[in-house]
Image (spheres, rainbow, N blue to C red):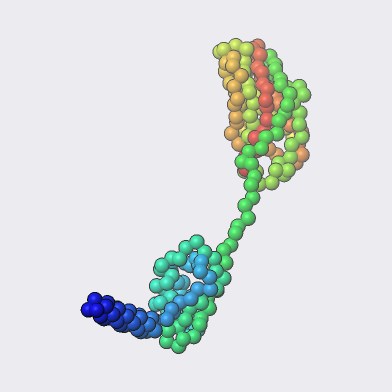
Amino acid sequence: MNYEKFVFIGAVIFAVLVLTNLIYLDYRLNNLPTSIITPSSTNLVLPKEVPASDSASLSSQGCDLVCQSVFQEYIDKQVSGAKSDILKIVNPTSNSVISIPAPTPTIQPLTLQPSNYYVYFVISGATQATDWADASGTQILFDTSSYPGAKAFYFQGNIRSDAPDKGAWARIFDVNHGVGVVGSDITFTGLESTLKESGPINLLPGNNVLRIQIHGLDGNFAYIDNAKIRISY
């Protein structure tokens, strides 16, 4: 009998404690401060600092120093990985809602273009001449205006001699103007065919006929192949 009374009293005490805790929790929840910043999306990307123009906009919409301070504090938290069109904040003083449009990113178009382009003369040539001689079949038409945006033009070719101690020379000849293209000379001494490149060449305007000229020294053979103009962008 005494045991049953002890259990009953214990149950009453436990029920009183539970009820007291529930009343206390209800009181604390009813007295919590309301949220003062409510983004329109749970995922929001914001800048680290408020520009002066945005601060002025906040002030003009009735957002006082306290409101602006709260707004800055929220931004400093750097909520990441999100998108939003509108940020909404609540002025704690006037309880009014202020909307700030989020910045729109600008995407620049990307234009891809090769850094180099080649125009080939195609035919190989050889000569024993000691002065400039035309390499037969190497004639092409070339107009610099067909390559807008080009920064420079260069002459390239694999040249060699038939003697290890003799040189071979090559250049581009402008048939329309009857002159060698300024800066196009290349040379090499040796038996092994070697790719050589000139400095920037000075091609005259217009659709000109260009051909390759070569020569050797003291009767040795001079050879050229793989001749081309490199166009640099």
Q: Quadrant of the N terminus?
A: bottom left
**Which residue shows up at 34% across the image and 82% down it?**
19
Outermost residue toward the bottom in this view? 94
Residue 20 placement (x, y as % from top left): 31, 82
Residue 46 placement (x, y as % from top left): 48, 67
**Res 174 quadrant in image:** top right
**Which residue shows up at 72% across the image and 44% down it?**
145
Task: Say if 36 sits above or below 135 in the image.
Answer: below
Q: Nearer the viewer, residue 8 or 87?
A: 8
Q: Is residue 189 visible?
A: yes
Q: Is residue 218 visible?
A: no
Q: Nearer the viewer, residue 75 or 168?
A: 75
Q: Quadrant of the C terminus?
A: top right
Q: Nearer the viewer, residue 193 or 168?
A: 193
**Res 138 quadrant in image:** top right
Relative to 43, is 118 on the left or the right? Answer: right
| Label total for image | 0
**Which residue shows up at 60% across the image and 11% down it?**
163
Outermost residue toward the left in this view? 2
Residue 89 placement (x, y as % from top left): 48, 78
**Which residue shows up at 62% across the image and 15% down it?**
161
Relative to 51, is 117 on the left or the right? Answer: right
**Res 199 quadrant in image:** top right
Residue 129 placement (x, y as % from top left): 69, 16
